[in-house]
Image (cartoon, rainbow, N blue to C red):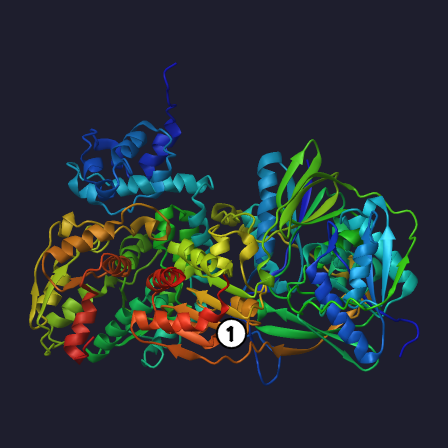
């Protein structure tokens, strides 16, 4: 008896619709599977080629590793046709979601986002705790020109709160009229989007858009590339009209306009990691480098696999919340960073920073891990860290 | 004192041939309460047969009288026969106070009696007091243990379930004397449930431990090392709720408001942040020493000695030193 | 088709509740509510039985009108119907009055096979309501259950006790109280939510709909009262900091624990 699978035309058409026919051009060369960073460390973790093939034929893809994809997009970057493979992964996840079949851990995360407005454990009452003593405007109570969207990870993680504090200081120094939603801020929904829970995402996004509109803000800037991606690329279909930026775009603009003048030299050799959602998704490769180059005394030593080829830290696509065993991608990445001889690894993404800080500790490397704005803050306000 | 309702009664829950510790703890407290306003303490013991020895033991732990109800249907705890038997006893003898251990069976029974006889019932108390003429005040913890409500019953007998570990086990007085009275409560209804399977395993009850090491989520990557430390020192091993929720440790050993309440002489707490519901489970410890890498973790202010440090490094070193000292 | 009734309570999020030290009352302002976590497990257990055997699931709760979105959330998760028992007369009820009221509402529902409750609520945590409801309805009860099966029309439940468990079988109707955390409550179906928001009507029953008098419910129907609230002082500690190099710290820890080490 040959083991046959059943082709489901309805499924095929649904996947085609969800992905704007992404799988059409694939001729199964296998470059995607060959270049997937997950397979780099743990061979045969995931098979993007087979996922796209299943979509082409309308086959069910119910292998658990569907949920291990970090949606980093390196496969798409290497693909001869630039096929949007992460979209195919998300489409399959959406179909699973509709059938109410998602990993237990994700079910718990969704509840947390729904009930507590956060994807990271933390009470909504404590969401603005990091602003204490910093004199930051409350955008839920007064109109602001720029809305700084902080995000869940940054709000509740002590290490990441420093990034928010630095950014707030730099924006104040530059005279930007900005504020935060504080306790009113709710998860941007990146994890909901990546789980494929589109019905819940619609409600979440609509409610967020209403909150943003009430602030009167003319621009939204985010700390996380994942939030930036959501607001730039996903929220418009739910009605968001306010332009959104990742802070590196905004900061770069301020520096070019001369609104930020950094004077304290840092005498730093740094190496730059391009987070997947900042680089491949939003094409913001140059902005972090331009900012760093304008900090006196800073020299950039590039590591291997940068820009479109950057290797994922392992956390996108909801992976950050799963307990996956095996060698961590971030261990590999910090080793690459250390090889350059630079003292600081710059990664403008909260997930990347969490992973790299962990890996640097575990691998006992003498590397500092910093977000871009933390170095800007250091040079502007002169605090030694 | 009211002539109508007299006696501080304690439900003596059994497991096999022994009255369980939580019931004895309640018995000890009942003795103290009864002495306060001059009343008697009675134990209620139900089973199939041969209950005299346990009844004698209960007397030595403080009961003045033990009422025994013998019936094959009462061999093991079952809601319907037990609640029917107890309600008949209570209606006949009219105690002033009726206390139960807040074990699962105790709560199963107390809730049933409350509705059966229309009696107010305080729950899971950690504090009991008498005011006036035998009026019972009960302290009920709520909201994860941060707040205590002092409650009073408006009916008699005044009833309460008592949290295991809230009170200490009384001293056994081998000279103590009392009375055993066998009571015939009449025909009891058959249980509507059929027992398909029953499994009991001997689990070391950490609530009796004199010294304990407790692992928190901060050491989830190396729980074994913490457990090994407890074994090396011959201390009990416990964990916080998150570790139990994640299935990393058995449910029986988590310490907290909804888990085990421990009262050791010393507790070494490793990698726990010190959430209120955990603290209330270990607040009775005489000495608390904790290790947590986060300087702002609340546990530090709940400890007698605290270390801001990396447990993943410290525990192995402690193990090494202890190993060296043994030789 | 079996009819399962799930009793639900809406509770404040425990970690947010604080006591006002001056007025000795609970600070309710700004505190968010949730479906009592154990009741979510009870509902999930009912929905799993529905998935497997095709039962009808009705959710019932006694509370203020503010509970409406939570009752609807239960329907969004998959319950077929929801009824909120709401009336000023029910206010101030202790577990006895609450159970009596819920039992009366369940009686009014008509035929039912299984009643599921969470083992206890996150606020008061008494665990007394499920057995009291069962007694008022004069039906059997099995408490602290973490697994439920329907086999040839009978209910088989695994009851977890301290240091063991028992598997009991009972013919319906029977009431089960469900252990907190025994399953993963499914995330609500937001597609179904569109129907719930547009078309589902929550039934609200006041005291008039139940066969109860004012004396039997609420504060008047209670037989226990709260005299006062106190903050649980968890005892002052010495708070001595141990510091130094790693080896120095280890040394100091050893000195403290050494006297308690048993051979």
Query: In the rendered image, which residue does mark 1 sit on?
Result: B287
Circle 1 Cα neighbour tier, 10 Å, few/some/many (<14 / 14–19 / ≥20): many
Q: Is residue A141 left or right of residue B162?
A: left
Image side of residue B327 versus residue C170, left or right: left
Relative to C48, residue A3 above or below = above
Q: In which quarter of the image is residue B252?
A: bottom right
Return the residue nearer the eye: C19 or C198: C19
Residue C213 is at least partly visible in this image: no
- Above or below residue C232? Residue C76 is above
Residue C184: x %, y % from top left: 52, 48
Q: Position of residue B52 (x, y in %)?
A: 84, 55
The residue drawn where x is 88% and y is 71% is: B6
Q: Quadrant of the N terminus of chain B?
A: bottom right
What is the chain identity of the residue bearing mark 1?
B
Residue drawn at point x = 20 percent, y = 44 percent: A74
Residue reaching furthest to the front: B327
Q: Where is residue C111 in the image (x, y as percent from the top left)?
A: 75, 43
Dividing the image into 4 quarters, which one contains the C terminus of chain B?
bottom left
Q: Which residue lies furthest to the bottom in this view?
A: C22
Residue plotted at (13% across, 64% down): A343
Where disc 1 sits, the SS reads strand
A29 lies left or right of B228: left
| Quarter location, residue A10 | top left
Residue in the foreground of this view, choosing between A371 and B126: B126
Name the residue rendered at 24%, 53% in the picture: A277
- Give the percent coordinates (x, y) of residue B177: 85, 67
* Relative to C12, A61 lies left or right: left
Q: Is residue C92 visible?
A: yes
């Amino acid at each position: 008896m040959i083991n046959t699978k059943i082709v489901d035309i309805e499924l095929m058409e649904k996947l085609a619709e969800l992905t704007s026919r992404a799988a059409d051009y694939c001729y199964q060369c296998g470059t995607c599977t060959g270049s997937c960073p997950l397979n780099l460390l743990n061979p045969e973790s995931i098979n993007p080629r087979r996922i796209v093939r299943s979509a082409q034929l309308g086959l069910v893809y119910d292998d658990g590793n569907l949920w291990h994809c970090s949606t980093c997009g390196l496969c798409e970057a290497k693909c001869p046709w630039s096929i949007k493979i992460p979209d195919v992964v998300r489409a399959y996840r959406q179909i699973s979601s509709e059938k109410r079949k998602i990993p237990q851990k994700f079910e718990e995360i969704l509840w947390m986002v729904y009930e507590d407005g956060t994807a990271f454990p933390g009470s909504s009452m404590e969401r603005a705790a990091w602003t204490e003593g910093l004199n930051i405007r409350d955008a839920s109570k007064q109109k602001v020109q720029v809305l700084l969207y902080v995000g869940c990870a940054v709000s509740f993680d002590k290490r990441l709160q420093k990034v928010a504090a630095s950014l707030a200081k730099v924006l104040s120094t530059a005279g930007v009229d900005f504020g935060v939603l504080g306790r009113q801020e709710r998860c941007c929904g990146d994890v909901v989007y990546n789980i494929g829970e589109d019905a819940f995402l619609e409600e979440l996004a609509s409610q967020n858009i209403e909150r943003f509109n009430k602030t009167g803000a003319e621009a939204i800037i985010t700390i996380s590339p994942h939030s930036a991606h959501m607001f730039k690329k996903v929220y418009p279909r739910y009605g968001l009209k306010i332009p959104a930026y990742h802070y590196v775009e905004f900061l770069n603009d301020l520096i070019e306009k001369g609104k930020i003048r950094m004077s304290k030299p840092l005498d730093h050799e740094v190496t730059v990691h391009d987070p997947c959602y900042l680089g491949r998704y939003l094409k913001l490769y140059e902005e972090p480098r331009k900012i760093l180059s304008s900090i006196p005394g800073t020299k950039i030593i590039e590591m291997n696999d940068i820009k479109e080829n950057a290797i994922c830290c392992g956390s996108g696509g909801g992976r950050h919340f799963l307990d996956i065993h095996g060698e961590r991608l971030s261990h590999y990445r910090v080793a690459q960073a250390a090889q350059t001889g630079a003292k600081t690894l710059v990664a403008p993404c909260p997930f990347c920073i969490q992973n790299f800080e962990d890996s640097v500790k575990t691998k006992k490397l003498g590397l500092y891990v910093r977000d871009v704005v933390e170095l800007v803050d250091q040079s502007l306000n002169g605090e030694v860290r | 004192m009211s002539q109508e309702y007299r006696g501080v009664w304690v439900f003596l829950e059994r497991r096999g041939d022994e009255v369980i510790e939580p019931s004895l703890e309640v018995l000890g407290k009942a003795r103290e309460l009864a002495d306060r306003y001059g009343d008697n303490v009675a134990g209620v013991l139900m089973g199939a047969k041969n209950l005299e020895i346990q009844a004698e033991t209960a007397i030595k732990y403080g009961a003045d009288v033990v009422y025994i109800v013998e019936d094959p249907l009462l061999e093991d705890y079952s809601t319907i026969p037990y609640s029917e038997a107890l309600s008949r006893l209570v209606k006949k003898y009219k105690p002033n106070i009726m206390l139960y251990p807040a074990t699962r069976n105790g709560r199963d029974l107390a809730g049933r009696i409350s509705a059966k006889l229309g009696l107010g019932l305080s729950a899971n108390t950690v504090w009991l007091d008498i005011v006036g003429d035998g009026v019972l005040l009960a302290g009920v913890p709520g909201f994860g243990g941060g707040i205590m409500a002092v409650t009073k019953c408006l009916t008699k007998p005044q009833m309460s379930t008592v949290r295991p570990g809230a009170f200490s086990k009384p001293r056994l007085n081998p000279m103590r004397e009392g009375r055993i009275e066998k009571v015939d409560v009449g025909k009891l209804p058959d249980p509507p449930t059929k027992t398909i399977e029953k499994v009991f395993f001997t689990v070391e009850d950490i609530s009796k431990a004199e010294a304990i090491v407790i692992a928190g989520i901060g050491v989830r990557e190396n729980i074994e090392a913490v457990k090994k430390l407890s074994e090396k020192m011959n201390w009990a091993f416990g964990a916080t709720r998150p570790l139990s929720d994640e299935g990393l440790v058995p449910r029986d050993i988590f310490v907290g408001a909804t888990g085990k309440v421990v009262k050791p002489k010393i507790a070494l707490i490793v990698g726990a942040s010190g959430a209120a519901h955990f603290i209330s489970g270990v607040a009775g410890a005489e000495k608390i020493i904790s290790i947590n890498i986060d300087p702002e973790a609340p546990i530090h202010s709940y400890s007698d000695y605290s270390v801001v440090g990396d447990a993943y490094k410290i525990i192995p070193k402690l193990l090494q030193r202890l190993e060296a000292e043994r030789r | 088709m079996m009819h399962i009734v799930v009793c639900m309570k809406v509770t404040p999020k425990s970690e947010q509740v604080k006591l006002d030290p001056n007025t000795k009352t609970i600070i309710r302002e700004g505190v968010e509510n949730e479906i009592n976590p154990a009741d979510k497990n009870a509902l999930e257990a009912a929905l799993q039985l529905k998935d497997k055997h095709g039962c009808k699931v009705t959710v019932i709760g006694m509370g203020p009108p503010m509970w409406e979105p939570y009752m609807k959330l239960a329907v969004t998760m998959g319950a077929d119907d929801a009824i909120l028992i709401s009336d000023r007369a029910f206010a101030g009820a202790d577990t006895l009055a609450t159970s009596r009221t819920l039992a009366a509402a369940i009686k009014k529902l008509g035929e039912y096979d299984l009643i599921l409750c969470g083992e206890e609520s996150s606020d008061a945590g008494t665990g007394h309501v499920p057995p009291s409801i069962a007694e008022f309805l004069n039906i059997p009860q099995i408490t602290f259950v973490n697994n439920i099966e329907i086999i040839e029309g009978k209910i088989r439940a695994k009851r977890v006790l301290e240091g063991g468990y028992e598997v009991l079988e009972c013919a319906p109707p029977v009431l089960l109280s469900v252990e907190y955390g025994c399953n993963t409550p499914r995330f609500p179906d937001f597609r179904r939510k569109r129907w719930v928001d547009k078309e589902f009507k929550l039934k609200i029953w006041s005291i008039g709909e139940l066969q109860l008098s004012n004396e039997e419910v609420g504060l008047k129907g209670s037989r226990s009262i709260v005299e006062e609230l106190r903050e649980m002082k968890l005892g002052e500690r010495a708070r001595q900091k141990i510091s130094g190099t790693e080896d120095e710290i280890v040394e100091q820890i050893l000195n403290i624990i050494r006297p308690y080490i048993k051979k």
